[in-house]
Amino acid sequence: MDVALLDELVPLFDPTAVPRVLGRAAALSRGYNPNMITHRLATGQWRRILPRTYLTVDTLTWNDRLTAALTFAGPGALLSGAAALAEEGLASVQRPSKVLVLVTVSTRVRSTAWVRIRATRRLPQRALLPGAARVPLSRAVADVALERHRLDDVRALVSEAVRRNLCTPDELADELECGPRNGSAHLRDTLDEVTAGAWSAPEARAARVLRRAGVPPFEQNARIDLPGGRYLVVDFLWRRLRAVLEIDSIAYHSDPPDRDATDERHLVLETLGYSVIHRTPYVVEKRADEFACGIAAWLSARAVDLGC
């Protein structure tokens, strides 16, 4: 069987069965004496995967790794960082090679193998979420953000987490204020951008470039009402000028259906009297000055056309 499929299976509960992952203390409490544990390890019935932590089945799954990390860390330990977010479907987060586990400062356990132990005075209550014990998602997002060195990587993470309602800007702001200062600049800047309306890293960068260039104020992710009660949300809107800027990333505009939907939006807006232009994240990043000058010139021409 594909190992990945094992992570999707929900095992039937059997109170008498030996858990897939078993700590030494739990094994002793179940009646396994030290000689019995040694025998099972020597004969391959069990496998030591972390100090004092054993796998009692053949295949180590992702969920087993999480359980093992928590078992090794001890009572009250919580997953954080990418390990706590990996199953939330975020494009910007993958299953990490090392699992981050938070413990209290009084816990006498240290990082080993693929487990990173971090002692903290701010160990939160366990999140009311299914699966392995983990911190609230806002804490997990903040912990990942503080370890990312590129501003765009932090933008992508935070904007996606907020857009998916995994956490709110206020919750992240609380984590920022209570957490470490070192490495927090990107998270602080990103929160300012998200609060101002950015829904993605390319949008956040575009907004910063435009503001820095002195382009007239704009709305981000602004709603435009359509006849019949429908509406569209556009990336950037200069409402008085009826001018719309869309940042078209490859990820969401390369497939034919996505391209058709973009073209349809463009047609609807133009029909209603809006001037609509499209730019790519590449232009915003690699030719920022040209991008800003082009937008400024377009808006000036639009003002002349409308007699504003």
Image (cartoon, helix red, strand yellow):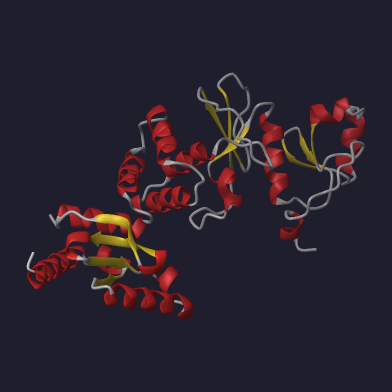
Q: Is residue 297 above or below residue 83?
A: below
Residue 118 coordinates in the image, percent (x, y): 54, 31
* Of the pair 208 and 107, the residue shown nearer to us: 208
Residue reaching furthest to the front? 228
Q: Is residue 307 left or right of residue 114?
A: left
Residue in the picture at 25% in, 72% down: 277
Is 48 situated left or right of 258 in this image? right
The reply, left or right, for residue 99 in relation to residue 256 is: right
- The quarter of the picture where residue 294 lies is bottom left
Between 170 and 77, the one lying in front of the other is 170
Looking at the rendered image, the quarter that the N terminus falls into is bottom right
Tell me how many marks there are. 0
Determine the residue positioned at 69% across, 45% down.
Answer: 65
The residue closer to the viewer here, 59 or 173, is: 173
Is residue 291 in view from this perspective?
A: yes
Q: Position of residue 185 (x, y in %)?
A: 32, 40
Residue 170 in which image quadrant:
top left
Camera sees residue 96: no
Looking at the image, the residue that sits furthest to the top is 106
Residue in the foreground of this view, choosing between 182 and 236: 236
Name the quadrant containing residue 186. Answer: top left
Could you tell me which residue is drawn at 34 percent across and 46 percent down? Answer: 190
Find residue 290 and report its horizontal and vertical position in percent. Answer: 16, 68
The quadrant the C terminus occupies is bottom left
Q: Residue at x 62, y 22 (%)?
A: 107
